[in-house]
Amino acid sequence: MQALQADFTLIDGQLRPDIVVRVDGARIGGVDAPPEGRVQRLRGRVLVPGFVNGHSHAFQRLLRGRTEHRPPGIDDDFWSWRDAMYRVANALDPEAMEAVTRLAFVEMLLAGFTHVAEFHYVHHQPDGRPYADRLAMAKAVFAGAANAGIGITLLRTAYARSGPGKPLRPEQRRFADTEPADYAGDLDALSAQPGARVGIAAHSVRALPREWLETLAALPGDHPVHAHVSEQIGDVESCLAEHGMRPVELLDDLGLLSSRFTAVHATHLGPGEAARLGRVGATACICPTTESNLGDGLPDLPALLEAGAALSIGTDSHARIDPFAELRGLEDGERLRTRRRNVLARPGRDTAETLFRAGAEGGARSVGLDAGAIRVGARADLVALRLQDASVAGVGEASDAGRALLAGLWLGGHPRLVSEVWVGGRLVIEDGVHPGWDSALAAYANVARTVWT
Ligand SMILES: [Zn+2]
């Protein structure tokens, strides 16, 4: 058992001073309990629940810095970025996948993420034939997470076509399964791996025909279900042309929506689609740094919140890995879109509280993880942030210190504030250092040289 006492601790959306948090094994055993035994004093620090990265394709970190130049004669948009992504996706074998995902996961821990929902879609050999072990690539991702020390929910992705009436392109073959039964078999086999947390991902209504979506909706169990939803206007238009309805309407009609469902992006929703997500208590996972990097557009977050949907954040393509930037992006996008301020504040709830809840609680809920808040019984996924930094210096010097500090952290926070990180009670970052950084970087750099030379 250990006990932690920071200057401030985030409890139920508020920063409270001098709380003692007891950690029993992997779980929080006491909050504000009288200290028993030695208390580790986290001086000059704030203790918050670990952030949950609700949407990640970890291998795409290899694209960082590689797609920010406009090729001559090309009007650059999402689809030209996707071509570069395919080059990377087709260059990796299981060993390279482990190396690349490990570095991405270590970077996530250094930034304050304690759990990742990995939307995994590179399954087979580049020509589409399964590996001798059909799960080789998924096991490589699990190994990357275990070697980094981050918690992971692997969302096994279904993918079957390039688009309505369009067969797979050669570079998409390794993402696809021949039959829905192959998908279901792999999902079962992954779920049977010791300690594995697994969920279902429908890549998108573009990449799956109706019968595949029906099969996914009928799968037994209580897995989380995630899907890319309406990231691009082209996704909406092709769905309307094929099905006569918009993506959320189709997913609802086919029975995929529930409180276990997460709509990733939800950028271009039509009237009534937010209400359908809210009615069932689904989550919308917004990835502001990726969505701005790819030029996707801005979702209507108040419509989702008012409908009753939860919000979470994801770093998706890993143009950056920074939960503070994602939180800022949620509110900044709304201010620019609506020309108003404090758009995500709710009665009795400051903007900062809405954002921090999205960063931890919303993501935990979207993968069915008992975490995302500092309360008795929850997983001890915890992050200590240092206050001796120019970005937050002096912000908490008044009677309403907690309220100002929480706002200061979303306005000015950045990964360099992360001092300690505990995943399931285990200390994985100490004084801002991950012990496996050097070896992770060496393995990653080898892969990067091979892919980009
Ligand atoms: Zn994605």
Image (spheres, helix red, strand yellow):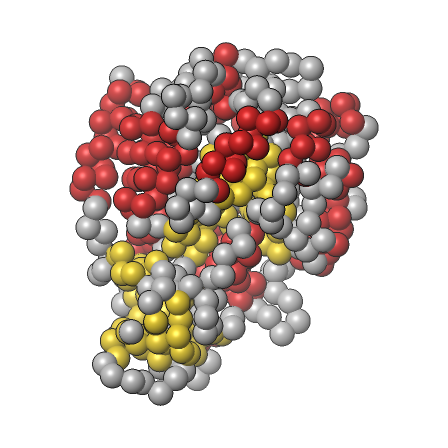
252, above or below 397, in the image: above
In which quadrant of the rendered view does residue 320 lie?
top left
Query: Residue 11: x percent and y percent?
Result: 47, 74
Left or right of 354 on screen, residue 23: left
Q: Residue at x 53, y 51 (%)?
A: 367
Q: Residue furthest bottom?
A: 34
**Is residue 156 visible to the viewer in this orientation of the structure?**
no
Give the number of marks. 0
309, above or below 409, in the image: above
24, above or below 146, in the image: below
Query: Residue 179: x percent and y percent?
Result: 60, 22
Where's the N terminus, which quadrant? Answer: bottom left
Left or right of 71 on screen, residue 237: right
Query: Residue 91: x percent and y percent?
Result: 36, 20
Where's the C terminus, which quadrant? Answer: top left
Q: Residue at x 58, y 42 (%)?
A: 226
Nearest the eye: 290 or 144:
144
Nearest the eye: 404 or 240:
240
Left or right of 222 on screen, residue 453: left
Q: Residue furthest right?
A: 244
Left or right of 169 on screen, residue 208: right
**Is residue 25 visible to the viewer in this orientation of the structure?**
yes
